């Protein structure tokens, strides 16, 4: 179960952002890669819900297929019971479950992936901003 900031936003719809760039499903659907795009404040493909340590988008959850450097975030079935579906938020980093890999995007465009956690790396700093009603 996630701790800290994530628990504040349980059952609320939020943007997950860095500066003015948001996580975005890019309408890929199940098994689709999560990307980062300029925030548009309209929800839809940038709307995520935090629930029980999972980050949900529509009927799916953010996940990584395996705990490896550079692994892309994808949308998976939330009933998968895969430990790589769980996320912890601490010091503005989003860490994949019981790994030492954190969400990153170094270019403000393209796929979002995981790298070894470094709380001082600005490309690993994220905010959850409540922008939409659940």
Image: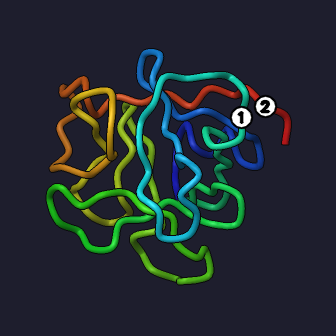
Secondary structure of the residue carrying tag 2 is strand
Image point (30%, 58%), residue name: 72
Up the image or down, 102 lies above or below 87; here it is above
The x and y percentages for residue 102 are 28, 48
Q: Which is more foreground, mark 1 or mark 2?
A: 1
Taking the image as shown, residue 129 lies to the left or right of residue 89, namely right
Tell me whether circle 1 and circle 2 mark residues in contact (CB < 8 Å): yes
Q: Nearer the viewer, residue 50 or 47?
A: 47
Q: Residue at x 55, y 23 (%)?
A: 39
Residue at 37% in and 57% down: 73
Q: Can you give x and y, in whole percent of width and height, for residue 75 in the image?
A: 51, 64
* Quarter that holds the C terminus: top right
For the residue carrying disc 1, how many other residues have a C-alpha within 10 Å: few (<14), some (14-19), or many (20+)?
some
The tag earlier along the polypeptide, 1 or 2, is: 1
Residue that numbered label 2 is attached to:
132
Q: Estimate the spatial distance between the alpha carbons at disc 1 and disc 2, rounded to whole Å.
A: 7 Å
Report the residue at 64% width, 61% height from top: 52
Whole-percent x, y for residue 5 in the image? 55, 37
């Amino acid at each position: 179960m996630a701790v800290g900031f994530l628990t504040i936003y349980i059952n609320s719809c939020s943007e997950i952002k860095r500066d003015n760039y948001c996580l975005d499903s890019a309408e890929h659907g199940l098994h689709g890669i999560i990307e980062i795009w300029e925030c548009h404040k309209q929800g839809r493909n940038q709307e995520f819900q935090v629930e029980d340590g999972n980050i949900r988008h529509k009927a799916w959850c953010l996940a990584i297929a395996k705990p490896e450097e550079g692994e892309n975030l994808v949308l998976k079935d939330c009933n998968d019971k895969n430990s790589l579906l769980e996320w912890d938020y601490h010091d503005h980093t989003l860490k994949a479950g019981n790994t030492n890999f954190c969400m990153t995007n170094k270019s403000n465009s393209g796929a979002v992936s995981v790298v070894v956690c470094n709380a001082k790396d600005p490309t690993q700093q994220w905010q959850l901003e409540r922008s939409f009603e659940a």
